[in-house]
Amino acid sequence: MTEEIQGWQASWLRIRAVARRHAYVLQRAPQRWFDVVFWPIVDTILFGALGVQLARASDGGHAAIGALLAGILLFHVVFQAEISLSTGFMEETWDRNLLNLLVTPLRESEYIGGVVLFGLGKLAMAITTVSIVAFALFAFHVTDFGPALIPLVAVLLVIGWSVGLIVIGLILRVGQGAEILAWGLLAIVMPLSGVFYAVNALPGSLQPVARLLPTTRVFAAGRTVLAGHALPWGQLAWAVAGTLVVAAVAVLWLRQSLAVFRARGFISRHV
Amino acid sequence: MGPILRARGLVKRYPRTVAVAGVDLSVDPGERVGLLGPNGAGKTTTLMMLLGVVTPDAGTVEVAGFSLPRHRSDAARHVGFAAGYLPLPERLRVREFLTMFGRLYGLADPSRAVALGLDRFGISDLADNMGTELSSGQRTLVGIIKATLHRPALLVLDEPTASLDPDVAMRVRTGLERLCADEGTALLVTSHDMLEVERLCERVVFISHGVVVADGEPGEVASRFGVEGLEEVFLHLAAERERQRAGGTA
C-alpha cells in the first residue's frame, strides 16, 4: 500500500514536486540557460565596459564601474525573481499542462511556492555568474556591499515575485498574448528605477513616478553603501513599505484573475 | 454510504450561449457512468465544473463529501482526471511525469504506484521514454495511469479513446475494467464511441442543450427513445439539435 500523506507535509511535498518539475525543464532546455548564464554575462560585460569608458572620459576612477556593475547585479535579482516565476507558469501553458495541475490537490499558493523555490536556485546561479564575471573582468567585488546586500536583495526579490504574479494574472485573464509582459514590464520599471543613476538624472516629469517605486529606493541605497556610507535605513524602510503595498496588490490581482479565469472558463484557451 | 459525486442545478452561461442549463448528476461509489451527448451539448463544461476548474453560475458540487469550490483541494484527493486531448509535458520522462503527479496527490514515495500503473496498462517498457516520444495512444494510457496513482474513488475521463486505434482503445477499456474491478473505482466518462460506452458503463446520462434528457441503464435509455442502441439515441439527439439550429437561423 502506498503511503498517502496529508497536511503541511503533503503541502511541502507538492511544493518540491513543482520545483523539481521545473528543474527538469532547465536541465533539458538549453534556451533556458540564456536567462541564467548568457544574459548575466552579456549584461556584466556591457555595463562593465561602459563603466570603464566613462571612468576614462571623466577621470572618475573606479566609481562609475562600481555603480554600473552594482546596478546590473541588483537588477538581475529583480529580473531573475520575476522571470523564473512568470516563465515557470508559462511553461505550463506552453506544455498544455495547466488542466492537469488544476485538477490535482495542488493549491495555487503551493504552485507559486514551488516555482519560487526553483527560482531561488536560478537566482543563485545568475548572481554567481554576474559576481564571477564582474570580479574576473573588472575587479568588482560583490562583497563591497557587505551585510547590506542581504536586505537589499530581500526587498528586490519580493518586488520581482510581485511583478511575476501580476504577469501570471494578466496571462490568466488575457491569454498567451500577455506573455510579452514577462519581459516588457521590467523594461518599463528599469529606467524609472534609477538602476544606474540618481532619480534627478531623469526628465523632471518622470521623477515623481520614479520616487514612488520601491525599486528606486533600493538601487539608491545600494549606491550609497558602495560609496562607503552606512546603509540608509530610512530609504530602506520606504522601500519595504512600498514593496509590501506592491506585493499585496499583486496577490489580490492574482486571486481576482484566478476567479475570472474559473468563472469565464478560460481553461479552454489552454487545452 | 452516499454518492461519491453529487451535483445539483449546475448552470454555466457564457456571453453568447448557455453551455449548461441546470444539470443534476450523482455517481455512486464503484458505479460506471457514461456522460453522453452531441458536440456542444455541455459535457466538457459539466466535467470542468465537477472538477472545480470552472465555477458554475448556479448550483452545487460535492465530491466525497467535500463541497466545491471551498474544499477543492480536499475533494481533488479523491478524484482522478484524464483526457484524450491532453499531451504530456515536453521535457519529462514518463516516470518523472508520473512521479511528479503522484507527489501532487500526496504519495510520499510514488514509485510502487507508478510501477503498478505502468504494469496494469502494459507499458512498463515506456517508463524512461520522454513524453514527446510516445504515440497518442501511449500518451492516453500514461494520462490514465497519472489519474489513478492515488487510487481515487472517482475517475473522470474526457474522451479517453478519441482518435485511438481499435486495439489501443481496447487496451484502455480493458485496463479501466481491471482498475474498476480491483479498486472499486467509480467512473464518469464522456465518449463519442457508443459501443465502448455500452461495454464499459452500467448507466448513461445523455445531455442535450445543457440539460439532462435521459438517465438510466443503456438498454432502458435506448428503449425510452424507441431505438435499439445508444448510437441511435445519440443520432436522434444530434439530428434534433441540427433541426433546432436550422430553425434558429432560418
Image (cartoon, rainbow, N blue to C red):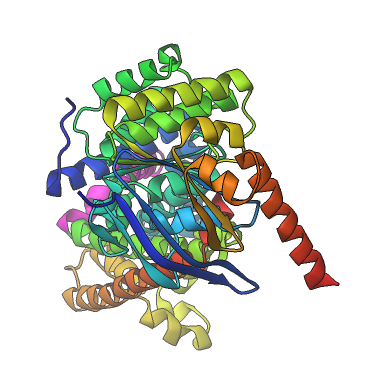
* x, y percent for residue A162: 35, 65
For residue B187, above or below residue B138 = below
Q: Residue furthest right?
A: B250
User: Does residue B45 appear to the left or right of B33 in the view shown?
Assistant: right
How many marks overall?
0
| Residue drawn at x 33%, y 69% as measured from the top left | A251
Q: Which residues are magenta?
A: A121-147
Q: Which secondary structure type mostly characterizes the magenta part of the structure?
A: helix
Query: Is residue A95 at all visible to an observer of this figure?
Result: no
Query: Is residue B151 at all visible to an observer of this figure?
Result: yes
Q: Quadrant of residue B165?
A: top right
* x, y percent for residue B84: 54, 36
Q: Which sits in the foreground, B64 or B215? A: B215
Q: Residue furthest top?
A: B125
* x, y percent for residue A253: 39, 72
Q: Which sits in the foreground, A185 or A22? A: A22
| Residue drawn at x 48%, y 35% as measured from the top left | B89
* x, y percent for residue A173: 51, 67
Magenta-span inclusion, residue A22 = no
User: Does residue A171 appear to the left or right of A100 in the view shown?
Assistant: right
Q: Which sits in the foreground, B126 or A49? A: B126
For residue A213, above or below residue B8 = below
| Residue drawn at x 27%, y 69% as measured from the top left | A221
Magenta-span inclusion, residue A132 = yes
| Residue drawn at x 64%, y 57% as measured from the top left | B40
Q: Which sits in the foreground, B88 or B239? A: B239
User: Does residue A184 appear to the left or right of A200 in the view shown?
Assistant: right
Image quadrant occupied by the N terminus of chain A: top left
For residue B110, above or below residue B66 = above
